[in-house]
Amino acid sequence: MTTPATVQRHRRICDVHLVLIRDGHVLLSLRKGGYASGQWQVPSGHLDEGEPTDDGTAREGFEEIGVTVHTRDLELAHFIDHRSPGEEPRLGVFYRALAWDGEPYNAEPDKCGGIAWYPLDNIPPETVPYHAAALTHIAHGRVRSRFGWEPTTATPHTQG
């Protein structure tokens, strides 16, 4: 009797992002301290262990900007395979809230320098680069992208 080989599976961190759009404007929050301090982003965070992406997105919305979003009101807006220099690759899931309860406010002033609405087609240049890329794709109706990967020669399993 033989024992099946143990395969070490690759794992990635999954970021979740909440996209609120009102009258053609997207809500952005200003990072304060740590990674990308002084740059704008959509409200976002990491999944908790065992948490589905839609639940994590709704949780982050409540924690960061004080709104209640029901998962039934979340629509997948974009999926991005991204990496930043010196960081491990990550997967980013952007959900657009079709409805929410409450008026957004800065619920984490220790981590956030403020919130503001910006035209979706004219976000500030000081936006976290992969967030800016994802928002551009969302504005153009593209559901998936990758960011921060050097161009490589396509192999049969990556051509498409």
Image: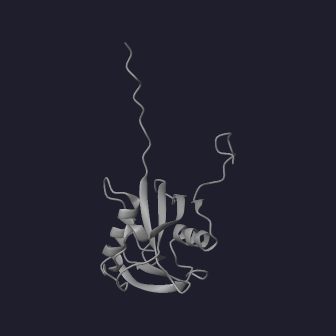
Q: Residue at x 39, y 78 (%)?
A: 100
Give the side of residue 138 with respect to residue 33, left or right: right
Q: Residue at x 60, y 83 (%)?
A: 122
Residue at the front extreme of this rendering: 72
Above or below, 152 relative to 26: above
- Can you see residue 49? yes
Above or below, 47 relative to 23: above
The figure's colour scheme reads one colour
The picture places residue 91, in percent across and down from the top left corner, at 48, 56
Which quarter of the image is occupied by the N terminus? top left
Give the side of residue 35 with respect to residue 108, left or right: right
The picture places residue 156, in percent across and down from the top left corner, at 68, 39
Q: Nearer the viewer, residue 24 or 71?
A: 71
Instruction: Give the quarter of the image for residue 29.
Output: bottom left
Q: Residue at x 40, y 23 (%)?
A: 4
- Can you see residue 35? no
Q: Residue at x 41, y 67 (%)?
A: 72
The picture places residue 28, in percent across and down from the top left corner, at 46, 80
Q: Nearer the viewer, residue 153 or 24?
A: 24
Residue at the top extreme of this rendering: 1
Above or below, 87 relative to 2: below
Count of all numbered marks drawn on residues in the image: 0
Q: Nearer the viewer, residue 133 or 101?
A: 101
Instruction: Give the quarter of the image for residue 37.
Output: bottom left
Give the side of residue 148 with respect to residue 1, left or right: right
Give the side of residue 125 with respect to residue 160, left or right: left
